[in-house]
Image: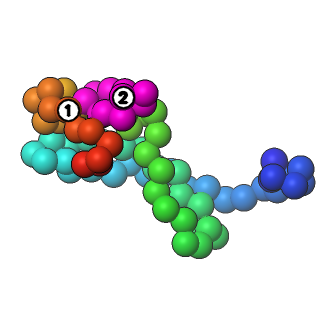
Amino acid sequence: MMADGIRQTITALRTVVDLYIEDKVIPTEFLVLPEAKGNKTLLGLDFLNAAGIVLDVQGGNGIFPKILGNSTYSSKRL
């Protein structure tokens, strides 16, 4: 349902892409909306779980144990 409450049927495509972060490969599923224009990619919880990323929202940190060997990045560097 759209934000204005109107239902709309759209075509969506599904693909899996290997994302490379440092020297790690994380297969990530994407849903593609062919008619959408100018959208940015949003990596969601599935990606965070697959990559082993733990977010500390209150502290403004991201912990990347699987990718960067338990490295912690503050929100100032993300």
Q: Is residue 57 magenta?
A: yes
Q: Secondary structure at mark 2?
A: loop
Residue 34 location, quadrant: bottom right
Identify the residue at horizontal 59%, vertical 61% (top origin): 33
The amino acid at mark 1 is Thr
Q: Is residue 58 left or right of residue 66?
A: right
The amino acid at mark 2 is Gly
**Is residue 29 at all visible to an observer of this figure?**
yes
What colouring does the structure picture have?
rainbow
Number of other residues with Cα within 10 Å of mark 1, as a class: few under 14, some 14 to 19, many 20 or more: some
Q: 9 above or below 49? A: below
Q: Start and end of the magenta stretch?
A: 52-63
> Which residue is nearer to you in this view: 40 or 71?
71
Q: Is residue 32 magenta?
A: no
Identify the residue at horizontal 61%, vertical 56% (top origin): 12
> Which residue is nearer to you in this view: 38 or 7?
38
The disc label shown at residue 72, or none: 1
Question: Which residue has dot 2 on it?
Answer: 59
Q: Could you say where residue 10 lies in the image, as x and y percent from the top left?
A: 72, 58
